Amino acid sequence: MAPHESWSIAIDKDYLKFSAAHFLIFPDGSAERLHGHNYKVYVDLHTDLDEHGLVVNFQEIKPLVRALCDELDEHLLLPGSHPVLTATPVGGQYEVRYRDRHYLIPVDEVIVLPIGNTSAENLAAWFGRTLRERMGDRWPSLRLHELSVGVEETPGQRGIWTLRE
């Protein structure tokens, strides 16, 4: 069998981070108290080399990752696909309900994500899917082999999502 070569880049920059509030909902229905993290984002990207010998130009991919971090920064992140939690816009606020909890939060301070829970692994999945979509818009001919995104909520503890095409 002939050897197979592949190429990838890894992005791990101190400025690829966001601060956000959330609470996890556990399988038994209990939930954490509302709290926040200083999240850090990691990206690994595997593609064919382009005609210039690059996977993707670092100077072009880093701003895409940074823009996603900036979108999430300083918001309350809520799971829009949870079967019990609801987040309903009422006037200029979200009315958030989960069991006996009830919050009223200004709309511009909340992001409702299409995920079932705001775990690090689900945040990594949202981040990776959104990054993949934006990469496809920017580089329609890019032949992606693998994209992996890690979202670290505390040092040494991260959720990782991987797409293999």
Image (cartoon, grey):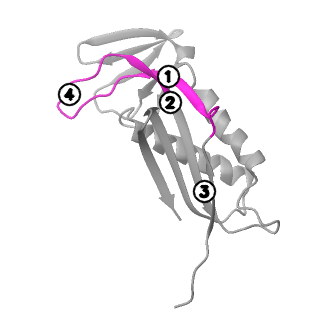
The CA span between labels 2 and 3 is 20 Å
Residue 130, given in percent of the width and then of the height, sits at 57, 44
Q: Amino acid at mark 2?
A: Tyr
Residue 1, given in percent of the width and then of the height, sits at 51, 91
Q: Could you tell which of marks 1 and 4 lies nearer the N-terminus?
A: 1
Residue 163, given in percent of the width and then of the height, sits at 49, 57
Label 4: state its secondary structure.
loop
Find disc 1 in the rendering and name its residue: 20
Find disc 2 in the rendering and name its residue: 39
Q: Give the foreground label among 1 and 2.
A: 2
Determine whether label 3 and label 1 are within 8 Å by CB: no
Label 1: state its secondary structure.
strand
Closer to the camera in the image, 74 or 84: 74
Closer to the camera in the image, 106 or 28: 28
Q: Could you tell which of marks 2 and 3 lies nearer the N-terminus?
A: 2
Q: Amino acid at mark 1?
A: Ala
The CA span between labels 1 and 2 is 8 Å
Label tally: 4
Find disc 4 in the rendering and name its residue: 29
**Is 25 in the magenta?**
yes
The vertical placement of 1 against 7, above or below, is below
Instruction: Residue 98: give its label.
Output: none
Find disc 3 in the rendering and name its residue: 45
Q: Which residues are magenta?
A: 13-38
Q: Give the foreground label among 4 and 2.
A: 2
Determine whether label 1 and label 4 are within 8 Å by CB: no
Q: Amino acid at mark 4?
A: Gly
Q: Give the foreground label among 1 and 4.
A: 1
